[in-house]
Amino acid sequence: MDQKVNIVSRAQWGAAAPRKRETLKDCAQRVVIHHTALPICTGMKECVDRLVSIQRAHMTERRFDDIGYNFLVGEDGTVYEGRGWGVVGAHAKGHNHDSLGIAFMGNYNSDAPSTEELSAVKQLLQSGVSQGFLQPEFVLFGHRDLGSTQCPGDKLYAALPQLRGTA
Ligand SMILES: [Zn+2]
């Protein structure tokens, strides 16, 4: 079922303009799941504060052109637009040009992902496929599958099979 995902836009959370923006050449073939490794945020106000500081850290300390991820999701299942659809991210070195990066906002070494955020991400992926931004046979990875990192945390990594497949 193609349920509508509610996405809080960049304008709605007050994102700063990107320094530059590179479009993906094709629809994304892969999805890379991350965690922010920060405390979870609950509710829009807290998550928006967190987003603003993540964007600032990515653009100043890490010198990215924008917040690194394409989308982020809060514990209550609200999805926040990062770079958005069809844009090259900065989230998995060497793998950014054919993938979509989604970050769960929290530290999933210790916390388990909520059913709300898992189902919101699943809907987001289905919506990406139906809009042609994501290949129907996309392959979903945890960041640790592609690089030397603990990301997205043991508990979220264990839940990734729930995000695979579009059944
Ligand atoms: Zn990561």
Image (cartoon, grey):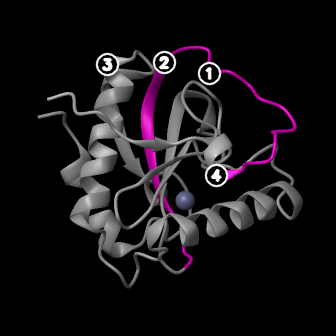
Q: CA distance from mark 3 to mark 2?
A: 11 Å
Q: Quick check: marks 3 and 4 in contact, CB under 8 Å?
A: no
Question: How far, Cα to Cα, is label 2 from label 1?
Answer: 7 Å
Ranked by sequence position, the earlier of labels 2 and 4 is 4
Residue matched to label 4:
13
Residue stretch in magenta: 13-38
Q: Secondary structure at mark 3?
A: helix
- On the rendered structure, is 17 left or right of 15? right
Question: The N terminus is located in which quarter?
Answer: top left
Numbered tag placed on residue 130 in the rendering = 3
Q: Nearer the viewer, mark 4 or mark 1?
A: 4
Asked if marks 3 and 2 touch (Cβ < 8 Å), the reply is no
Q: Which numbered circle lies on residue 24?
A: 1
Badge 4 amino acid = Trp
Nearer to us: label 2 or label 4: 4
148 vs 65: above or below: below
Give how far across and how far down residue 94 sits, in percent.
65, 41
- Residue type, numbered disc 1: Leu
Specify few, some or many for label 4: CA neighbours under 10 Å numbering under 14, 14-19, or 20 or more: some
State the predominant SS element of the stretch in magenta.
Answer: loop
Q: Which residue is mark 2?
A: 27
Neighbourhood count class around disc 3 (C-alpha, 10 Å): few under 14, some 14–19, many 20 upward: few
- Under tag 4, what secondary structure? helix
Asked if the magenta segment contains residue 122, the reply would be no
Q: Residue at x 79, y 64 (%)?
A: 57
